[in-house]
Image (cartoon, rainbow, N blue to C red):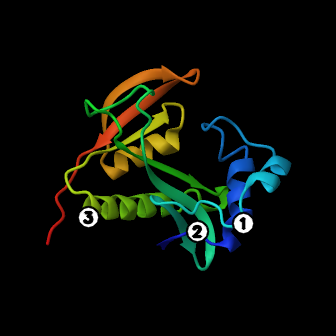
Amino acid sequence: MLRESEAGDRAAFIELFASPEVRTYLGGPRRRDELEHAVPEVPGRRPGLFVIDLDGAMIGTVSLDRRDAERPGHVRPDAGEAELGYMFLPKAWGCGYAAEACAAALDWFADTLPSEPVVLCTQTANDRSMRLAAKLGFAEVERFEEFGAEQWFGVWPSVTPSA
């Protein structure tokens, strides 16, 4: 289930950002003591960010944010495309939850902003994320070097929702 974050999700948010496994392709883990100090009581409460809830517990997040115009990789001349992002606790890996949650978020987005593309950027070394992008229907637009690694950049074509 996708839902808004709650105070009870704080420990899972800290675990996501402190996990070396989760953060392998996202700039590395952050120090737990810094996160304990910095993470608000109700973390992640903002438009476009969803907590993935499995049986009452947070197992990850999925988000749709505007891609920074200064970064490489765009499909619109004015940039600012919606970019899909996701992080899951390792215990949830390999169960199909990422595909299910991301598909639900993409459906929500298509209903909310029909005809607007969604982009995804991931390191080519991240095999799991590359497979997920393909499973979700993202098509490769380009590859480029960023953050010292080759990045794969793809677009999910907008779909007009059925009435």
Reading the chain from its start, which is encountered first: label 2 or label 1? 2
SS class, disc 3: helix
- As measured in the structure, the alpha-carbon distance from the residue carrying label 2 to the one carrying label 1 is 10 Å
- Which quadrant of the figure has residue 111? bottom left
Q: Which residue is mark 3?
A: 111
- Quadrant in which the C terminus is drawn: bottom left
Q: Nearer the viewer, residue 78 or 127?
A: 78
Q: Name the spot of residue 56 as percent of width and height, x first.
A: 61, 79
- Three-letter code, disc 2: Ser
Residue at (34%, 26%) from the top-left corner?
Answer: 142
Q: Which residue is mark 2?
A: 5
- Three-letter code, disc 1: Glu
Q: Name the spot of residue 29 as percent of width and height, x first.
A: 73, 42
Q: Nearer the viewer, residue 141 or 130?
A: 141
- As measured in the structure, the alpha-carbon distance from the residue carrying label 3 to the one carrying label 1 is 31 Å
Disc ID at residue 41: 1
Q: Is residue 78 above or below residue 106?
A: above
Q: Name the spot of residue 46 as percent of width and height, x first.
A: 52, 60
Q: Nearer the viewer, mark 3 or mark 1?
A: 1
Residue at (81%, 47%) from the top-left corner?
Answer: 34
Decide if residue 158 is on the left or right side of residue 49.
left
Q: Residues within 10 Å of mark 2 (few under 14, many from 20)?
A: many
